[in-house]
Image (cartoon, grey):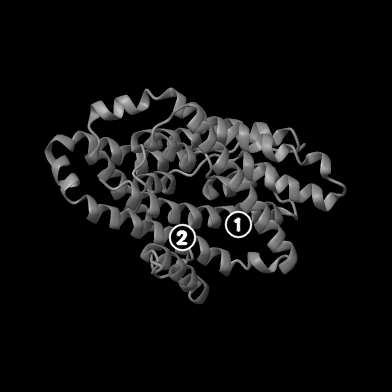
Amino acid sequence: MKLKIDRFVLSVIGVIGLAYLFPQWGLPDSNIPIDTISAIGISLIFFFYGLKLSPSKLKDGLKNWKLHLLVQTSTFFIFPLLVLLFRPLIQNGEQEIIWLAFFFLAALPSTVSSSVVMVSIAKGNIPAAIFNASISGIIGVVLTPLWMGLFVKNGQTDFNFTNIYVKLIVQIILPVLIGVTLQRFWGVYAQKYSKQLTLFDKSVILLIIYKSFARSFEGNIFETISITDLLLLFVAVLALFSALYLLTGFLAKKLKFNTEDRITAQFCGTKKSLVHGTVFAKIIFGNMSSIGIILLPLMLFHALQLLIISVLASKMGVKNQG
């Protein structure tokens, strides 16, 4: 039997290699406005989503309360409680910091853009993904500091999140609403060129992956600890992700979700936001000397979730085509 290698998988590996060789292109001070390009790309993706959604389907999708409950429960309760189980194993201050870093990761909200893009590629429930990924960031503003407040004595929670909300509305919600409004005029074209739009989705994901890895490589986060410790952290992050992915899939099956809803539950309920994580880290941990270690599991998880979910989404998209 001839082994067929997914071209998107090769593309993901390629952009990671590119990020390692040329990380400077993905930095905020680069001459290439990669943040602007990705922001425009994400807004266009959500605009195209809106074109594919009829108002009636969007309304029906938002009524799926069981799916919404599973996604938010997985994100803000199952995730933290799973990490909380390991707290009794802590024996010293260094282990305390590592555990706190993982608990911080577990308490964060889900990503917005990449979650919905991945759900779209895998042919999942897009309206539900948009709703859950968007509302997750808002819920996280309240629940993440509350979770961390149980273990961080001097946390501060009076940060101004106005910029985050403005970005959420302008970059995500508004394009979707415009697309839905124009759906009756241009919706037929969105369906006609669905394959081309999927290719566009994947291109934006590759850009996000490149940017994430480029900034990780440039920040030398992989040099702050030994190779052995890094491997152990990587295994722990992989185990955490796998456990949540399998658990959400199991619960979705028990709740008798269809394929589209199961994909959305597993993709949205297992991801964590690097953007929110860096903001919350400043709020909760301030100028702690160990802030780099606190962010390390999140950086590893962020890169790993993009890599694994992008591969799974691509394969599911082909399987569920048509």
Q: What residue is rendered at 64% in x and 35% in y?
A: 145
Mark 2: which secondary structure?
helix
In which quarter of the view is residue 280 placed? top right
Is residue 31 something one can see in this rendering?
Answer: yes
Mark 1: which secondary structure?
helix
Vertically, is 262 above or below 301?
above
Residue sitting at the far bottom = 21
Query: Three-letter amino acid code at disc 2?
Result: Ile
**Where does residue 296 sit, x and y in percent of width and height?**
65, 56
Residue sitting at the far right = 91
Q: What residue is rendered at 48% in x and 68% in y?
A: 16
Toward the viewer: 82 or 30?
A: 82
Q: What residue is rendered at 47% in x and 36% in y?
A: 265
Residue sitting at the far left = 185
**Where does residue 297 sit, x and y in percent of width and height?**
65, 53
Query: Three-letter amino acid code at disc 1?
Result: Leu
Using residue 247 as the reference point, say whether residue 27 is left or right of it: left
Position of the C terminus by quadrant: top left
Q: Which residue in the protein does label 1 denote?
A: 300
Vertically, is 21 above or below 155?
below
Q: Which residue in the protein does label 2 denote?
A: 209
Toward the viewer: 193 or 166?
A: 193
In which quarter of the view is residue 245 placed? top right
Precedes in sequence: disc 1 or disc 2: 2
Toward the viewer: 255 or 300?
A: 255
Toward the viewer: 245 or 275?
A: 245
Position of the N terminus by quadrant: bottom left
Are there few (<14), some (14-19), or many (20+) residues within 10 Å of tag 2?
many
Using residue 47 as the reference point, say whether residue 182 is left or right of it: left
**Where does residue 30 sit, x and y in percent of width and height?**
44, 69
